[in-house]
């Protein structure tokens, strides 16, 4: 599955359900330079992001840091997070949890300027 978004696009690479019922979903995400994901959190899923190319600014639970190719970010349920592409960003995202649905997302801010207002620089 391929989906265009305001910030770029993503493609689902794999989806599996374990014998215990937990799900694992793998996406390849492309974020255009200057664009960002919303500042958001999830209730029932964790995510691991592996940056495969480009440079970005990550805000996680109010903390800002630079990320680039080779960096790995672990996002637990309830952890607020966003990323902005300084250059075109490519990310492999692995989601895991008991039920992986797109609706498991609480968006706090959409625009980077608003996200910067709540981050601790």
Image (cartoon, rainbow, N blue to C red):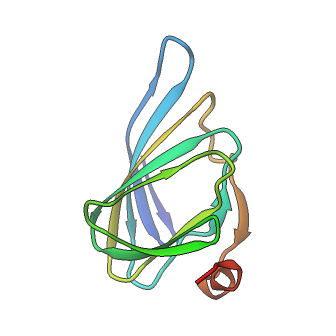
Image quarter (top left, top right, bottom left or bottom right) of the C terminus: bottom right
x then y, percent, for residue 67: 37, 70
What residue is rendered at 66% in x and 75% in y?
A: 110
x then y, percent, for residue 76: 59, 46
What residue is rendered at 52% in x and 28% in y?
A: 23
Q: As displayed, is residue 51 above or below residue 58? A: above
x then y, percent, for residue 115: 65, 79
> Would you identify the image quadrant in which residue 8 lies?
bottom left
Q: Nearer the viewer, residue 44 or 6?
A: 44
What residue is rendered at 64% in x and 54% in y?
A: 79
Looking at the image, residue 58 sits to the left or right of residue 77; the answer is left
What residue is rendered at 67% in x and 56% in y?
A: 41
Q: Nearer the viewer, residue 19 or 65?
A: 65
> Would you identify the image quadrant in which residue 70 lies?
bottom left
Q: As displayed, is residue 49 above or below residue 43? A: below
Q: As displayed, is residue 121 above or below residue 49? A: below
x then y, percent, for residue 86: 38, 83
How many labels sit on residues? 0
């Amino acid at each position: 599955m391929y989906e265009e978004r305001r910030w770029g696009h993503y493609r689902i690479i794999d989806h599996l359900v374990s014998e215990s019922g937990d799900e694992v979903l793998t996406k390849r995400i492309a974020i255009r330079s200057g664009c960002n994901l919303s500042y958001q959190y999830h209730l029932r899923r964790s995510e691991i992001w592996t940056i495969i190319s480009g440079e970005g600014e990550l805000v996680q639970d109010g903390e800002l840091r630079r990320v680039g190719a080779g960096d790995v970010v672990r996002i637990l349920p309830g952890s607020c997070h966003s990323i902005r592409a300084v250059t075109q960003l490519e990310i492999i995202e692995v989601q895991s949890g008991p039920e992986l649905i797109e609706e498991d997302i609480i968006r706090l801010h959409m625009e980077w300027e608003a996200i910067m207002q709540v981050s601790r620089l």
